[in-house]
Amino acid sequence: MESVKVKVLFTGSIQAAVGKGEMEMEVSSDIKAAAGDIRKEILKYAPDLLYTMLVNGSHYTYALKAGTELKNGDVLNIIPVTLGG
Amino acid sequence: MPYGYNGKILRVDLTTGETSVEKPSVKFYRKYLGGNGFVSYYLLKELEKGIDPLSEKNILVFAASVVTGAPVPGFGRQSIGALSPLTGFYGTSEGGGHWGPELKFAGYDALIVKGKAKRPVYLWIKDGEAEIRDASGIWGKETGDTFDALAEELGDTKIRTLLIGPAGERLVKFAGVASDLRHYHGRTGMGAVMGSKNLKGVVVRGSQKTEVADPEKIKELNKFFLENFPKNADNRTLSKYGTTAYYYGANSAGGLPTDNFRKGHIEIEKTIEELHEALKIKTEGCYACPVRCKQVFKAEQPYNINPRFGGPEFETMGALGSNCGVNNLHATAKGHELCNRMGLDTISTGLTIAFAMECYEKGLITKEDTGGIELTFGNQDAMLEMIKKIAYREGYGDVLAEGSWAVAKKIGRGSEKFSISAKGMELALCDPRVKNGVALIYTISPLGGDHLQAEHDGAFDPMLTGYSHAADDPDFFMRGAYQIGVLEPVSSLSLGPEKVHLVTNLQHYWSLFDALDLCIFVFGPVRTFKPAQLVEIVNAVTGWETTMYELMKVGERVTNMMRIFNIVHAGLTRKDDHIPERLYDGLENGPMEGSKIDREEHQRALTYYYEMMGWDRENGVPHDGTLYGLELGEFIPMLKNRE
């Protein structure tokens, strides 16, 4: 898989933990591998953040099901996950 | 005396005015633990079949557990249970605060109330003595004024109270019970059952402390919690913002129920920082808990918000806010205050108002019906006005006080689809279309639309655990799951057999929580205390040598008892294990636009669930072997002879 440059946006409590709202990242064009690349980056700030990912505004699972590959300039939103409570 | 518990259960007959004490065996405590374990046992053993839930024949159980009151975070809760007047099915509601520990300090582990008082009364339990006292002077008062009157009468401002307000007195089907005014037993209409018995409140005070078997171990585990909860993502967020943070998280994920579950996203007028800056004056906590997730809000303009009633949780913000199309958080906080003062479940109240808003939008309810109120989505003053009308059963509020499903059946003409309910109880504000396991949770909940039968999907999604197995990436999330027998992450958007397995195991664990009256925010598998530590804590408190296997079996046992109850008392069949029709429609906006529950996949999941539980595939009736395996053989004849 090739590498692509994407914009990663951090939202809410994830932004607070990471300490920034966005960053440019070079990640794999494969969505699963990209998720791993981003996770490694997030782990630098906090080990246990609960989040999920949007790919260009849609849940990442949809992109996986569609077999989508990431392209240069794509936007990945890292948003908090809510549990029961 | 045993460690951890008193070995005494108080019985009160309000019809005769008699009280008595029973002393169950150690085996009984070990088999049911307390909380919802006790509720399920006493309802199953002693409730007459075919009764009206609001008649004197209903039984109310108030229960703490073998560990309640031990000085450990998350041990400050209690259960209330009865046949639900809202659903006709099993009813129970757990709440936090200090009441449960105080009941233990007063010498009892649980309280069973039967009959009906001739006039309004309250129960006063202090250091082993129980008294039925006249409440004629406080009947009609809101919860705050009731507390003040009782504190004055008893000469003690440190009393711990479970109280109903005007809604419970008027038998609003979703009336709740206020625990020390700021905590709440909202669900399944337990406040109406208290009202039907002329029982205004249960007040406790005690001076003994819960003796634990191994104080040093408890100290060690508490030290661990104190050092580690600020490092846990969810506990850290709860400490700062309480569950209000979930409102923002759900909205950004496209799963915040909006306009009666049609949409998943709303434009919120304030950021979370602005909200807390504007309204929060402090945080509070339950007994022995340093997380202190309870937010206390105060304001004078444009709505006066009295801080003694705390502040809204996520569910309340969603129910009275986004789901009614209201994005003004000040108005939502006012709605929360009204519900706590008057004794209403905020979830059922909000969803019933949203139901009426959609009926109004479609012309099924008119301005004439509502007494001139423009019941439109986004009309915050209409939402607030309707809360009062429901609580006091005034005007159209008297109709809505029956709950959305009952009203829908009366109106007909397609309005049933606007009632977002299961088994007759309105859903919580967790949309299964963004976390599919929650669809199964609502489907199989013995209570109806209750979201707390199991943890939700997000923490077990491969986004967090499956796509980055680097050596330096330990399984922070799955570690808790491994300990309850779940080894693989599962996508949030799956309802396949692997998701059913996840939900089933989590349900056993959650059911155990309710039997021990524990807080999910402390003991959930991705929170600070992991399952293995729970076992250590139970042993350190009780002196037992229990195991995760034994404890999980209690959870499974209680779930089966609730199932038996619903089959025997309410004729439950597969058709009652359902979700609202709307969830098969796609979300209309937000990042999850178009997402829906697949009907066939949902039905397959239900069948898998029945099978994993050891129930028959057709209607989910527990097999004899399942019940014998859980030492519930004594209830088999009840199931066989249910006709």
Image (tube, coloured by chain):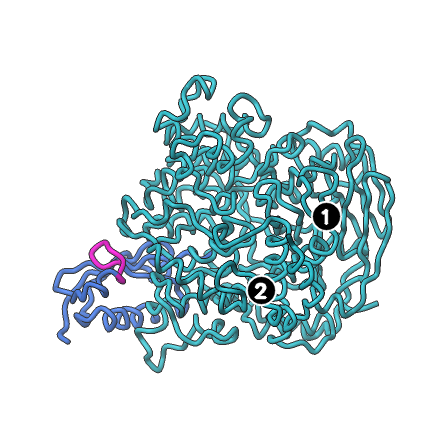
Chain colours: A blue, B cyan
- Amino acid type indicated by mark 2: Pro
Query: Closest to the observer: B607 or B5?
Result: B607
Q: Position of residue B340 (x, y in %)?
A: 58, 37
Residue drawn at 37 percent across, 36 percent down: B327
> Would you say A69 lies left or right of B427 here?
left
Q: Position of residue B592 (x, y in %)?
A: 29, 52
Query: Closest to the observer: A37 or B549?
Result: B549
Return the disc, 2 or 1, that comes first in the chain's sequence: 1
Q: Which residue is mark 2?
A: B622
Give the quadrant of residue A26.
bottom left
Query: Closest to the observer: B288 or B89?
Result: B89
- Amino acid type indicated by mark 1: Glu
Letter of the chain that mark 1 sits on in the rendering: B
Q: Which residue is mark 1?
A: B48
Give the quadrant of residue B471.
bottom left
> Would you say B50 lies left or right of B228 here?
right
Identify the secondary structure beneath mark 2. loop
Q: CA distance from mark 2 to mark 1?
A: 21 Å
Q: Which residues are magenta?
A: A54-61
